[in-house]
Amino acid sequence: MRNINTEYTKLKRNLVLINACMATFMATVDGSIVNIILPVVSGAFGVTISQVQWVITAYLLCISSLLLVWGKLSDIYGRKHLFAAGMVIFTLGSAACGFAASFGFLVVSRVVQALGASIMMALTQGIVTEVFPAKERGKALGFIGMVVAMGSLAGPSLGGILVHSFSWQAVFFINVPFGILGVAMTYLVMPENRRLSAGKAFDGRGAALFVGIILLAFLSLLNLQEGSITALTAGLMLAAAAFLVIVFLGWERKTQSPLLDLSLFDSGIFSIGLSCAYLSFCAMFAYNFFMPFYLQYAAGMTVLQAGIMMSLFPMTMALVAPVSGMLSDRISYKPITVVGLSVSTLSLFLMSGFDAGTDRVAVGLCIVLLGAGSSIFQSPNNSSVMGSVARDKLGTAGSMTAFFRNFGMVSGTTLSVIIFSLVTNLGIDNITGSAGTVQLFLKGYQVVFLCAGMVDLLAVLLSIKRARTL
């Protein structure tokens, strides 16, 4: 079998990377840009804030439940046409969102949009890994990490500009020209579509079980976080999801062409890498959820000041991610991942000591430190995970990386809210900014960040184990 990354010229590899970055940017921006328009959409369609949250929830559920499906399909049938189809579906879904005349149609259109986004997210890392040689893989995946950070940074501000200058529909219409360009570039520069695992059938039963697991698990966590279901109901849903996990694993072990090749986890590099990524995102999204509340309610910043302070995180990631990826190409991912996680762990523990009078410069430096540590870790870690699998399993590996990232995001947010509520007996919606409430908030905030630091410390220990033994 030919080796694609030795056949491609530097120009073609870079064009593939540009196309992958554009797809990543669109999918990432669309996950954050919509937040800014929720109040406007709520008023436009006459729905409540809790109802309008489905614009985000439907997108997240669809992406997370289908990532592994697309990864496996790409390993069986190839990536080029599937990636192009993802861009087409995403573009059509974006246009449909813009033309939505009812709230129900908007939610359905978001599901269509997420269908395309999930394909792009699942395949991007596999495509980049396939095209770039090992000595350049870390740098290329570092650029993907940079684009993810830039998408997170640009989403809210870009959404605000578009809504102010045009309308909320412009948030979706802006994807259309870039989607068309992306489809054209895919067919012009991406490697030819080839069957990678000829003769293997798609595991439909495994896919159905996996989708059921994700829907039960994510719906329980998301609804528990919002307070729309009781802890008992959430526990029953999680128990049902756990039962389906047992059934799923039993089926995957005996079927000839499993959706998830469990032998991938025999590699310590792969399994520890995904575990560290999951723990890192858990910790990071505890910060992502609670830091805006701290900045506005405890530190007394305006929305603009808090937004500028929060932007230090993705700005730092955008600057550091390509550099850390390049370093992993030249030396090794092992010491870099340990250093990155150690830096982010230190920053979380420092943040746990914040109070209402903490100097703003110190707050900003800690946020920069967290962004630097996260980006130092992520690019080399992704490169090590993707480099540990065979070429015909890159789609599955890439989709697993994206899935663990999403699962970490949901888990981190939900668990941090639960910890905060247990410590303070106070819901986030009940924070008023009064002196007594601020002190109670700080008590819960500090415990949340201590727990986030402990979670990140566990990732450090796992990464040290990987560095010493593998």
Image (spheres, rainbow, N blue to C red):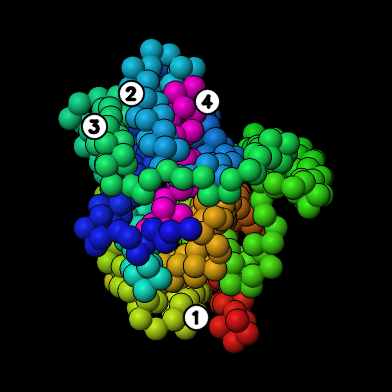
**Marks 2 and 1, how far apart in space?**
44 Å
**Marks 2 and 4, how far apart in space?**
22 Å
Q: Is residue 113 magenta?
A: yes
Q: Are marks 1 and 4 in contact (CB under 8 Å)?
A: no
Q: Are marks 3 and 4 in contact (CB under 8 Å)?
A: no
Q: In front of the other: label 2 or label 4? A: 2
**Marks 1 and 4, how far apart in space?**
45 Å
Range drawn in magenta: 107-132
Residue lying at 42% horizontally and 43% vertically, measured from the top left? 193
Q: Amino acid at mark 1?
A: Lys
Looking at the image, tell me whether mark 1 or mark 4 is earlier in sequence order. 4
User: Which residue is the site of mark 2?
Assistant: 95
Q: In front of the other: label 1 or label 4? A: 1
**Which image quarter: residue 457?**
bottom right
SS assignment at label 3: helix
User: Which residue is the site of mark 3?
Assistant: 177
Indicate left or right for 198 with 85 as reference: right
Looking at the image, tell me whether mark 3 or mark 4 is earlier in sequence order. 4
Q: Amino acid at mark 3?
A: Pro
Q: Are marks 3 and 1 in contact (CB under 8 Å)?
A: no
Q: Amino acid at mark 4?
A: Gln
- Around disc 3, counting alpha carbons within 10 Å, would you say few (fewer than 14), some (14 to 19), or many (20 or more)? few
Q: Nearer the viewer, residue 422 or 416?
A: 416
- Around disc 4, counting alpha carbons within 10 Å, would you say few (fewer than 14), some (14 to 19), or many (20 or more)? few
User: Which residue is the site of mark 1?
Assistant: 334
- Around disc 2, counting alpha carbons within 10 Å, would you say few (fewer than 14), some (14 to 19), or many (20 or more)? many
The image position of residue 452, as x and y in percent, is 56, 66
User: Which residue is the site of mark 4?
Assistant: 51
